[in-house]
Image (tube, coloured by chain):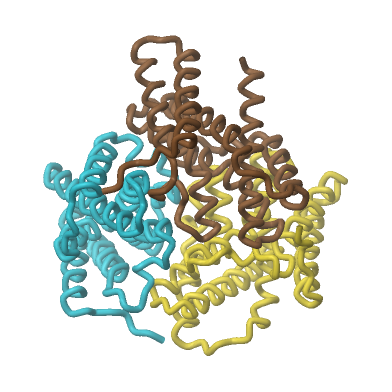
Chain colours: A cyan, B yellow, C brown
Amino acid sequence: MENILLVLTYIAVTASAISGSLEARKHEMDIVGAVTIAFVTAFGGGTVRDLLLGRTPIFWVVDPWLSIVTFIVAIISFYWLDRISEKYLNIPDAIGLGLFSILGVTYALQFEVSAIVAVLMGVITGVFGGVLRDLLCNRIPNVFRQSTELYATCSFTGSWVFILLTWAHLNDLIAAMIGAATIFILRLLAIRFKMTLPSP
Amino acid sequence: MENILLVLTYIAVTASAISGSLEARKHEMDIVGAVTIAFVTAFGGGTVRDLLLGRTPIFWVVDPWLSIVTFIVAIISFYWLDRISEKYLNIPDAIGLGLFSILGVTYALQFEVSAIVAVLMGVITGVFGGVLRDLLCNRIPNVFRQSTELYATCSFTGSWVFILLTWAHLNDLIAAMIGAATIFILRLLAIRFKMTLPSP
Amino acid sequence: MENILLVLTYIAVTASAISGSLEARKHEMDIVGAVTIAFVTAFGGGTVRDLLLGRTPIFWVVDPWLSIVTFIVAIISFYWLDRISEKYLNIPDAIGLGLFSILGVTYALQFEVSAIVAVLMGVITGVFGGVLRDLLCNRIPNVFRQSTELYATCSFTGSWVFILLTWAHLNDLIAAMIGAATIFILRLLAIRFKMTLPSP
């Protein structure tokens, strides 16, 4: 199990780093920009969560391998990756959204916060990397746009599923897997059927 | 007194959440954007203050009701609130500016920082919610514009009034009330008489 | 030595505050904007580093003189400094880049992080003030642009030089001086010969 989690983490971090690096290239940044945007996309959400909870030093400060992988992936993507179709990034990105959201909720619950705050921490962990990436690229965050398919909403829904299942005394690990799977599947469905939130 | 403070806090948080949510709608965001901007506007200043002082977990992480209220107010404002005249938000916003600035100074002084740093923490608490809101809406923060009526300046002035009164051995609570009232009145006067800061 | 360090720190902080304040004027901000941008430029990098490492209260919260100097320099620059040629700021800015990068690495190593994370903390300390300044001025950070002469790269290189020298059991102080000098000289060479990073 530990090993599966590790593999999934690196898949998700790699996807974030690739998307960040390509985004930087799209904005005519140099490799410094690409590496920074890759780091911000991959670690931004978890960093904000750790800061808000007071979990310092931050998670990537204590694990050099996350930085090394992000660094290398960002450089390779920036210089040698031809424009890849965004759809190849959708699946690893959705893995990351599910995994990191549930991890965020879990860490928050360890600080004995209320359910709503734990869910917010899950959403922040899953979503804020992309928000900070867009901020540094000087545009309104993509997840806030009316035309964007459900993203934060998937994280929000699956985080509640996870919490409700733990309240129902389901085994923590199974609850986490169902929560993460809910997010993953909901996100892919949202892309497939272009599901968006209702406008006012 | 405790009760009055609580009522004032929720008035100010509600005003911030409404203004954030309407701002999001103005920028054609969806409800995810509206809720996020509402949270950032309402809690951004206090969050930055708590992070800088090392007061973690952050204030709203330990009190779920603040999140619940902000969440509900943001959704209602986004979907059902017709454009309301900005002037109706001016008074609750000025209450928040006065209240949160003085709260910020008080918390800072508990960490035994110097007077100037305490005043800066007061200003950050009162003002940075709006700064972060504008940042996420991809524009130069409103409080930095030459055409904006005194805002941070009111917070700065009232925070010094509060500190000087405590130095003069006035009762803490009375000093706080005079400081907050100074900010509140100065802000309303600034709007009424279109008072701005001198340009270079 | 202690005294030299102090003088260099205030030279670098003054240069950052001047550049921040002038940048604010260029974007038609008022004095509130100028003071804020000056603070963000001067203290932003060290603040992000301290937050990530969990070194709170943040460095400038415990030393009022840094705030007082930044405050005064920002006001003077905003109202009375005629447009000064950017080249006069290059040397004090390069001093700051060298000094703060190596300080950042040193603080990080005190938390027993790995070499790569320590170097990242050095770069963040040296560079993120400017990144946050540009963010608040609503533009893509200058250090990420392809046309910008080596900046983060100088900090990155010198930080590694410092760490490699300490690994080679050189005296810490001498290693720090060589590291900072590397950054300082590399930055001035990069400006002089318009050295940029290779594009993809």
Horizontal side, residue A7 vs residue B66: left or right: left
Query: Is residue A111 in view from this perspective?
Result: no
Query: Is residue A150 in view from this perspective?
Result: yes
Residue drawn 19% across the image and 67% down it: A182
Q: Is residue A70 above or below residue A97?
A: above
Provide residue C30's location: percent of width, then percent of height.
70, 60
Q: Is residue B38 above or below residue C21?
A: below
Residue drawn 52% across the image and 79% down it: B22
Task: Name the foreground residue: A108 vs A52.
Answer: A52
Task: Name the foreground residue: A74 vs C146.
Answer: C146
Residue drawn 67% across the image and 51% down it: C35
The tally of labels here is 0
Task: Name the foreground residue: A33 vs A187.
Answer: A33
Outermost residue on the front side: it is: C193
Provide residue C96's location: percent of width, then percent of height.
56, 32
Residue drawn 32% across the image and 53% down it: A41
Q: Is residue C2 above or below residue B122?
A: above
Provide residue C161's location: percent of width, then percent of height.
38, 22
Q: Is residue A84 above or below residue C56?
A: below
Quadrant of the drawing holding the C terminus of chain A? bottom left
Horizontal side, residue A176 vs residue C114: left or right: left
Provide residue C47's location: percent of width, then percent of height.
53, 41
Task: Name the foreground residue: A56 vs A24.
Answer: A24
